[in-house]
Amino acid sequence: MSNLRPVTLITGASSGIGVELARVFARHGHALALVARRADRLNLLADEIAAGGAPRPIVIATDLALANAAQAIRDLLTASGCEPQYVVNNAGFGLVGTAATRDRAEQLSMIDLNMRTLTDLSLTFINSMQRHRGGLLNVGSVAGFLPGPGSAVYYATKAYVLSFTEALHSELKPRGIKVSVLCPGPVPTEFAARAGVVGDKPPGALTQTAQTVAEAGYNGLMSNTRTVVPGLANKLVTLATRLLPRRLLLRMVDRRQSRRRAVQPA
């Protein structure tokens, strides 16, 4: 048994889907610990949640790319008398452009954040999630179902998130831990600008709001749904990946990515 208070740990909580995930968990009565680099944004969100009558979330402003980030977060939570009941790995970023032309170090940093840090946080808090009968929500992407010419490394990281989380869903079920992977399609957030896209307009039928995606993720986790794909059109895309020849999928993604004008590094 543990005397530590259960909280929901949400990474990448300073913008986009992460903000909406924090709001939906707070509305359902979860105490929160919010993690991102931008302390000012985290504090604004924490103030907003507290103004709504919920306990003010713990704010952890840190760079998740650091090798010891998971341990540092664990130490800070323990010092605050808390431990995770739920872990939500939302932090991550993408890059548009061919792997040969994008900065190699930046692509390796993307691998570290999207895969290594997510894995570390997923495994670090298994015991506390089990103690509190909680769960793990990893944010992947519809991209994880597809090959990704034009964003090869990003698509590959999301394929890892999908495979890893689906496996944990089976492995952690005997421990009473819920595990879900949330796989949205295009969402109007800061993601495109960070990826280096100029003037991109996501296909309307595939686009979901960050609020809709967050609510789907929360509901999916609470019902222990293994894979959550918000929106009918996005579900059809994932179905198509099992029906269409891989060669055709490669051409379709390549054509789509070629229309997204990436800002290439100098």
Image: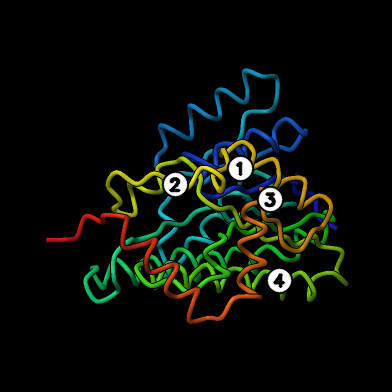
Query: Residues under labels 4 and 2: Cα distance?
Result: 27 Å
Query: Residues under labels 4 and 1: Cα distance?
Result: 25 Å
Residue at 33% of width from left, 50% of height from top?
194
| Position of residue 90 measured from the top left corner of the image (x, y, whole percent) | 55, 52
SS assignment at label 4? helix
| Position of residue 108 measured from the top left corner of the image (x, y, whole percent) | 34, 72
Q: Which residue is label 2 attached to?
A: 202
Query: Residues under labels 3 and 4: Cα distance?
Result: 21 Å
103 or 263: nearer the viewer:
263
Q: Earlier in the sequence, mark 4 or mark 2?
A: 4
- Amino acid carrying label 1: it is Ala
- Near mark 4 (Cα within 10 A), the count class, few <14, some 14-19 or many ≥20, is some
- Amino acid carrying label 2: it is Pro
74 or 254: nearer the viewer:
254
Q: Earlier in the sequence, mark 1 or mark 3?
A: 1
17 or 57: nearer the viewer:
17
SS assignment at label 3? helix
Q: Which residue is label 3 attached to?
A: 232
Residue at 48% of width from left, 35% of height from top?
42
Q: Which residue is label 4 attached to?
A: 166
Q: Which residue is label 1 attached to?
A: 33
CB-based contact (under 8 Å), mark 3 and mark 4: no
Which quarter of the rendering shows the N terminus? bottom right
